[in-house]
């Protein structure tokens, strides 16, 4: 996975947006990388779709609530939206 693909899932909205646009520009000039990038993005989405479970102490009390990693999923969605014109019907 490229650094741009990793930045797509960054917690900061501005970084996710910029990385998604950079990824689209990269794929426009490197169409042979589209299929593998889409697969990487789908894999990332599936990883970010699993919430972190809550942290529970030895008495069964919740010490820290579970974490929904929505920023990563949002970034993947932004990236797919930006690269959609480059994705072939066979990839979908």
Image (cartoon, helix red, strand yellow):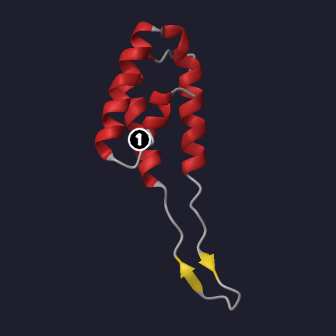
Please identify the residue farthest to the right as the structure is shown: 58
Q: Secondary structure beneath disc 1? A: helix
Q: In the picture shown, does residue 74 fall above or below 60?
A: above
Which residue is found at the position 45% from the left and 28% from the top? 4
User: Observer-nearest residue: 78 or 3?
Assistant: 3
Q: Position of residue 89 (x, y in %)?
A: 51, 17
Q: Position of residue 56 (x, y in %)?
A: 63, 80
Q: Position of residue 85 (x, y in %)?
A: 38, 18
Instruction: Please state, as top left, top right, bottom left or bottom right, where the C terminus lies in the image.
Output: top right
Q: In the picture shown, does residue 1 fall above or below 62?
A: above
Which residue is found at the position 40% from the left and 45% from the top? 74
* Quarter of the figure with residue 59: bottom right
Residue 92 seen anywhere in this rendered image of the structure? no
Q: Position of residue 55 (x, y in %)?
A: 61, 75
User: Observer-nearest residue: 46 or 15?
Assistant: 15
Residue 87 seen anywhere in this rendered image of the structure? yes
Instruction: Please state, as top left, top right, bottom left or bottom right, where the N terminus lies in the image.
Output: top right
- Name the residue carrying label 1: 75
Please identify the residue farthest to the left as the structure is shown: 14
* Quarter of the figure with residue 60: bottom right
Which residue is found at the position 37% from the left and 36% from the top? 78
């Amino acid at each position: 996975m490229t650094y741009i693909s990793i930045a797509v899932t960054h917690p900061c909205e501005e970084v996710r947006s910029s990385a998604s646009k950079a990824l689209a520009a990269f794929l426009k000039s490197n169409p042979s990388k589209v299929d593998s990038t889409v697969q990487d993005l789908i894999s990332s989405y599936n990883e970010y779709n699993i919430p972190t479970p809550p942290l529970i102490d030895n008495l069964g009390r919740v010490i820290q609530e579970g974490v929904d990693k929505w920023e990563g999923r949002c970034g993947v969605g932004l990236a797919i939206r930006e690269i959609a014109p480059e994705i072939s019907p066979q990839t979908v």
